[in-house]
Image (cartoon, rainbow, N blue to C red):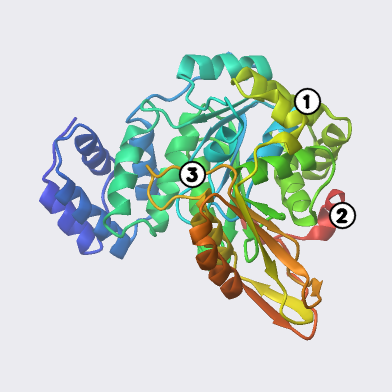
């Protein structure tokens, strides 16, 4: 590979200039091989954070990180391989529900997921709350499982986009995480390495999301779709609201339990709406439906006939999990301490800060502040009241569960900060606001998708 003057590249980016694909590839490759020190890569990341990247640069850095490791070839797996990625939120257990639905419809779902950090949960932590469930499969086993069941859940291995793992760790300690080109490149390098043919993105905005503003979320969605399109993958993004938690249960086992309830047809309205949209889109892109609307109808069918729940049982058993917990989730161990969050007056819930709910769950033991910190699968929160609900004085708004009773006062304080009340009911806004595809960004119109109603 051609060598370049690193200082000159940093200076050009610092001054608002653009780098070529070869120059970016050199920086990423040199850093991955320990030929470029942390202090120079940190300077480059800060320059990108301050000056941004154009579409060509964002695609180039995604390409470089993608090819820093192994890119899976799933051509031997029949069908169009489709995955889903969410930018994260509170109570977001949708992957656990939609992956079995889509696989039951015959679309292969190769899912490499992440862990929770801060106020947002992680799919791997939720899966590992199922006793025995193994997310640390090697890539040979990864292919075997998806061939057998059309779905697999694993974590990022050392072979998948190793440059991204190193760069993310560096961004985390250099205040350069909140950079849309770097976020987009990080997400897409991992997703493209899975061996997918198409990708559905759930880009969240609001109090419980990483990006609070819908306009910025739209920019990120366009970057993600542009990179996917550049690599020849059919990619679509939906912008969804995260101003209150999804569903009623927050915490690792609690979210698995709610996922099982959903697959049995007992859906919270918000979880149903977004899960069916994303599942329908995946089934459509996977060639098992002729339109989004038909895809949603197929998804509903596989929930109603029990085949999606059976698919979850299959994958839990295949990956070493205790299927008895899927069949009888009420037998799961309980946290040692519980507390009730009680309404102090009559009124209506007029606002919920999902970030504070997520932080309360973290303090109870369901999340981690650092990547190496252990989590408690039995800790979490069960909500009884959400936006627009009427409350009476003395009524339970939420239940808190923990094995760290000394943290209950902190969690209560966060719950108090999260909820606001008023004399009149406030209606929740639309959950799905925009769709972004290769044709651009468009308002999402519910009347065009009658299967959601």
Query: What residue is shown at x 75% (from left), y 82% (from top)?
Result: 345
Assign a secondary structure to mark 3: loop
Quadrant of the frame with the C terminus: bottom right
- Asked if disc 3 and disc 2 are in contact, CB closer than 8 Å, the reply is no
Query: What residue is shown at x 64% (from left), y 40% (from top)?
Result: 95
Assign a secondary structure to mark 2: loop
Q: Is residue 369 left or right of residue 123?
A: left
Q: Can you tell which mark lies on residue 375? A: 3
User: Which of the two labelled residues, at mark 1 and mark 2, occupies the earlier sequence position?
Assistant: 1
**Where's residue 206, x and y in %?**
58, 66
Mark 3 to mark 2 CA distance (whole Å): 37 Å
Q: Can you tell which mark lies on residue 310? A: 1
Crowdedness of circle 2 by 10 Å Cα count: few (<14), some, many (20+)? Answer: few
Q: Nearer the viewer, residue 3 or 270?
A: 270
Q: Can you tell which mark lies on residue 453? A: 2
Q: Nearer the viewer, residue 210 or 341?
A: 341
In this view, the mark in front (3 or 2): 3
Q: Nearer the viewer, residue 344 or 215?
A: 344
Query: What residue is shown at x 70% (from left), y 38% (from top)?
Result: 98
Q: Is residue 223 visible?
A: yes
Query: What residue is shown at x 79% (from left), y 81% (from top)?
Result: 346
């Amino acid at each position: 590979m051609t060598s370049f003057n690193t200082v000159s590249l940093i200076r050009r980016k610092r001054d608002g200039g653009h780098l070529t694909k070869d120059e970016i590839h050199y920086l990423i490759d040199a850093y991955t091989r320990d030929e470029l020190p942390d202090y120079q890569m940190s300077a480059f990341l800060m320059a990108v954070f301050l000056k941004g990247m154009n579409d060509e640069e964002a695609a180039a850095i995604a390409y470089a990180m993608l090819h820093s490791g192994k890119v899976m070839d799933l051509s031997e797996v029949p069908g169009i391989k489709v995955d889903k990625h969410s930018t994260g939120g509170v109570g977001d257990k949708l992957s656990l529900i939609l992956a079995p639905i889509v696989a039951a419809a015959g679309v292969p779902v190769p899912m490499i997921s992440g862990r929770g950090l801060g106020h947002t949960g992680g799919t791997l932590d939720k899966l590992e709350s199922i006793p025995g469930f193994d997310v640390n499969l090697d890539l040979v086993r990864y292919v075997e499982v998806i061939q057998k069941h059309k779905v697999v859940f694993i974590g990022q291995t050392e072979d998948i986009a190793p440059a991204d793992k190193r760069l993310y760790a560096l961004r985390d300690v250099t205040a350069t995480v909140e950079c849309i080109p770097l976020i987009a490149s990080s997400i897409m390098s991992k997703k493209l390495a899975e061996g997918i043919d198409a990708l559905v993105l759930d880009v969240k905005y609001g109090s419980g999301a990483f990006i609070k503003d819908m306009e910025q979320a739209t920019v990120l969605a366009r970057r993600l779709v542009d990179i996917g399109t550049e690599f020849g993958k059919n990619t679509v993004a939906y912008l969804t609201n995260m101003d209150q938690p999804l569903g009623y249960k927050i915490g690792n086992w609690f979210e698995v339990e709610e996922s099982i309830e959903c697959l049995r047809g007992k859906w919270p309205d918000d979880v149903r709406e977004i899960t069916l949209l994303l599942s329908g889109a995946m089934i459509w892109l996977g060639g098992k439906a002729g339109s989004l609307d038909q895809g949603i109808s197929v998804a509903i069918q596989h929930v109603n006939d029990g085949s999606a729940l059976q698919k979850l049982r299959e994958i839990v058993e295949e990956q070493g999990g205790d299927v008895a917990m899927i069949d009888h989730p009420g037998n799961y161990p309980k946290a040692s301490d519980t507390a009730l969050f009680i309404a102090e007056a009559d009124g209506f819930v007029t606002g919920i800060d999902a970030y504070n709910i997520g932080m309360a769950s973290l303090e109870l033991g369901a999340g981690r502040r650092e990547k190496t910190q252990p989590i408690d699968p039995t800790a979490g929160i069960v909500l009884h009241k959400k936006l627009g609900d009427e409350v009476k004085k003395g009524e339970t708004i939420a239940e808190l569960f923990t094995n760290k009773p000394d943290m209950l006062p902190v969690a209560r304080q966060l719950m108090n900060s999260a909820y606001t009340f008023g004399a009149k009911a406030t209606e929740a806004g639309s959950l799905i606001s925009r769709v972004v595809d290769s044709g651009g960004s468009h308002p999402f119109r519910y009347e065009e998708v009658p299967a959601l109603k």
